[in-house]
Image (spheres, rainbow, N blue to C red):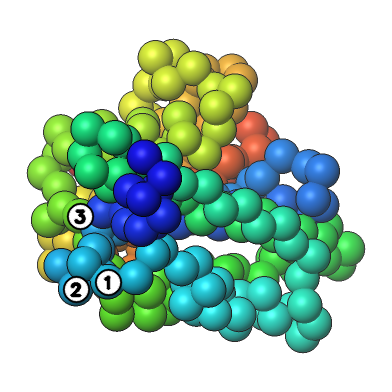
Amino acid sequence: MISALGKGRVDALRIVVACARSLDDVPHDVYLLELVPTTEAVAGSRFDELPYLECLEPVLGSSGGMLPWVVEVSRTHRGDRDGMGRAQLSVLLAVGDPPADGAPAPDLGPLMAEAFSRMVGRFAPDAPAPDRAEALGAAMAAVAHAYPDVDARALSLTDEEHHAEEGCWTVGLAVVGVTRFRVQLGLAPGLSASTHVHRVPLGEVVDSVGV
């Protein structure tokens, strides 16, 4: 067992970046990326999170100074798979309160898309562009992972948009009268496994086109 664990090999990696007003608040935006390693990475040295954290440096400094953060790295290995494991790298960022003058808060989406694209240099997306059923299932799964307090079985579809040329989907989900979400599948161009989950305040108007 010890020798297998010592190899530290993983064949799946999940990146989670959550943004909240403070490190003790509930996130309002969560970015996820599901990756599988290249053959070379699996056969190589043990999993190292530092290259992926380096990809996130521009996000950390997006406000002109380093944002407060919490990083958690976890790995789960199975003996019946020769110690092969799955890793998760979770980052919580405290982005502060929205501007007092009513101006929109900085949008980290483009920076996160760039960071996710850089990460694919060593890992590759684990799935092709989803069809409608897969997209709806992936959107609900993303909400369930990003917000464990929400019962995914209670989510209902409010609207959906399919951008076929970009290979991405935007899905609206809600627990009626309780909470709403906007889920973008394919946040980074060409990376269908990159996702942005935004928890929408109940009073916020969402501009969308249902199909």
Three-letter amino acid code at disc 2? Glu
Could you tell me which residue is drawn at 77 percent across and 77 percent down?
66
Image x and y of residue 55, in percent: 50, 78
Image x and y of residue 83, in percent: 30, 44
Three-letter amino acid code at disc 3? Asp
Q: Which mark is residue 211?
A: none
Do residues under tags 2 and 1 come within 8 Å of each other at their CB atoms?
Answer: yes
Do we see residue 183 in this rendering? no
- Mark 2 or 1: in front is 1
Image x and y of residue 82, in percent: 23, 43
Dot placed on the residue nearer the N-terminal end, 1 or 3? 1
Q: CA distance from mark 2 to mark 3?
A: 16 Å
Mark 1 burial class by Cα count in 10 Å: few <14, some 14-19, many 20+ = few
Q: CA distance from mark 2 to mark 1?
A: 6 Å
Three-letter amino acid code at disc 1? Gly
Residue furthest right in the image: 100
Report the front residue among 22 and 37: 37
Count of number-bearing discs: 3
Could you tell me which residue is drawn at 28 percent across and 47 percent down?
84
- Residue located beneath label 2 in the image: 40
- Residue located beneath label 3 in the image: 126
